């Protein structure tokens, strides 16, 4: 027997490692992610350097109805890209046609420019006067569906009126008279409203109250504007709201609620105020007038009443 007869053969097993090919899909995903981040940063940068007018133009572009954007038609038909309420883009039929027209009122681009130009000129006049410059923080400019709203706000340190009265402070008088010629240059009509905080008089609302105070302050502001050169024919409405319309996110007793609002009205809003219409045509007739207009000899049908009384008397007789 040979020497290698009792030895077992040595077998070496080597595991073969196969490297699978993963492809480049992760590279595509990473590239998409980086592109999205770059687009986001570009949008944020553009918004940070754009002016208010440019941002409003972008918002107006995205609120344009799709059919009007393609055909170049009027943009006042709808405020959303997706039409609704019927097949017509103007929404003359369907549910959208029954929406309050005031909600669909929007300043045109030309009116926006007029209002923004008025705001810039008012701010420029205030900035040039050292005394009026201190009141800049007490003014608010807002573009509303009714027009340009200019709010003159109270503070504890610098109230616009004497406490509890309609006596105009000298700096408030100077501010109103400085604004009057600028507002007078526009053809738009003006609405003035007064507001108070919730601090009530001792006699509550039975005597002189915040209703009278807010109205008197609005009327005092009207007089100062007229003294400053505003045509009285441009004044369409002077009203007082007491404490019923507080500033958003404020406490009822916050001094900022003591304010005067000057509203430079859009022409269509002024037309609605001058010519208040009614829904569904003429007013509803009174039932009393129909009864008086009934021809002589006509009688009310009392047969059901007689039948009820007869049945009731029979039932009582049976008992």
Image (cartoon, helix red, strand yellow):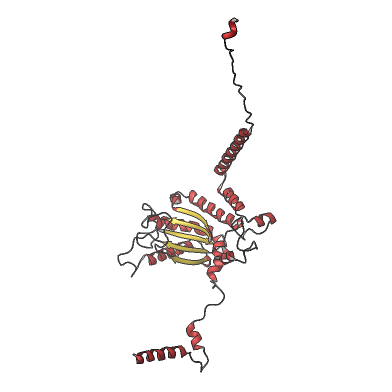
Residue 293: horizontal and vertical position, in percent? 51, 88
Q: Residue at x 55, y 48 (%)?
A: 52
293 over 99 or under it: above or below: below
The answer to whether residue 302 is visible is no
Which percent across, then down, holds residue 65? 63, 56
The answer to whether one can see residue 37 in this image is yes
Image quadrant in which the C terminus is located: bottom left
**Of 189 and 5, the residue lying toward us:** 5
Q: x%, y% of residue 301? A: 48, 90
User: Which is nearer the eye, 48 or 229?
Assistant: 48
Q: Residue extending furthest left? A: 202
- Residue 314's x, y, as percent? 38, 91
Q: Residue at x 46, y 58 (%)?
A: 176
Q: Please report the residue visible at 46 percent of the width from the left and 88 percent of the height from the top.
A: 304
The one nearer the camera, 236 or 293, is: 293
Quarter-of-image position of residue 255: bottom left
* Quadrant in the picture for residue 240: bottom left
Q: Is the N terminus in the top left, top right, bottom left or bottom right quadrant?
A: top right
Q: Relative to 227, is 66 on the left or the right?
A: right
> Splitting the image into 4 quarters, where does residue 98 fall?
bottom right
Picture layout, residue 141 above or below residue 13? below
In the rendered image, the vertical position of residue 16 relative to residue 113, given as above or below: above
């Amino acid at each position: 027997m040979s020497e290698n007869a009792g030895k077992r053969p040595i077998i070496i097993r080597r595991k073969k490692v196969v490297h699978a090919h993963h492809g480049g899909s992760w590279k595509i995903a990473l590239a998409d992610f980086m592109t999205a981040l770059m687009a986001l940063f570009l949008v944020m940068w553009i918004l940070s350097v754009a002016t208010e007018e440019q941002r409003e133009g972008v918002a107006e572009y995205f609120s344009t109805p799709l059919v009007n954007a393609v055909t170049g038609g009027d943009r006042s038909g709808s405020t959303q890209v997706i039409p609704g309420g019927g097949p017509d883009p103007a929404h003359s039929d369907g549910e959208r046609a029954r929406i309050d027209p005031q909600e669909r009122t929007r300043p045109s681009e030309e009116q926006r420019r007029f209002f923004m130009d008025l705001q810039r000129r008012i701010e420029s006049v205030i900035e040039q006067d050292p005394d009026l410059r201190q009141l800049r923080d007490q003014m608010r400019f807002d573009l509303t569906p009714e027009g340009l709203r200019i709010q003159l706000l109270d503070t504890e340190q610098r109230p616009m009126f004497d406490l509890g009265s309609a006596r105009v402070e000298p700096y408030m008088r100077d501010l109103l008279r400085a604004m009057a010629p600028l507002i007078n240059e526009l053809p738009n009509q003006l609405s003035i409203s007064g507001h108070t905080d919730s601090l009530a008089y001792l006699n509550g609302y039975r005597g002189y109250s915040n209703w009278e105070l807010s109205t008197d302050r609005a009327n005092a502001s009207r007089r100062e504007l007229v003294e400053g050169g505003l045509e009285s024919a441009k004044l369409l409405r002077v009203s007082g709201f007491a404490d019923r319309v507080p500033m958003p996110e404020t406490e009822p007793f916050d001094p900022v609620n003591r304010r005067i609002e000057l509203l430079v009205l859009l022409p269509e809003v002024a037309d609605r105020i001058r010519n208040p219409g009614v829904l569904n045509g003429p007013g509803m007739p009174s039932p009393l007038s129909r009864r008086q207009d009934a021809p002589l000899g006509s009688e009310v049908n009392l047969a059901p009443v007689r039948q009820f009384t007869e049945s009731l008397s029979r039932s009582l007789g049976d008992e």
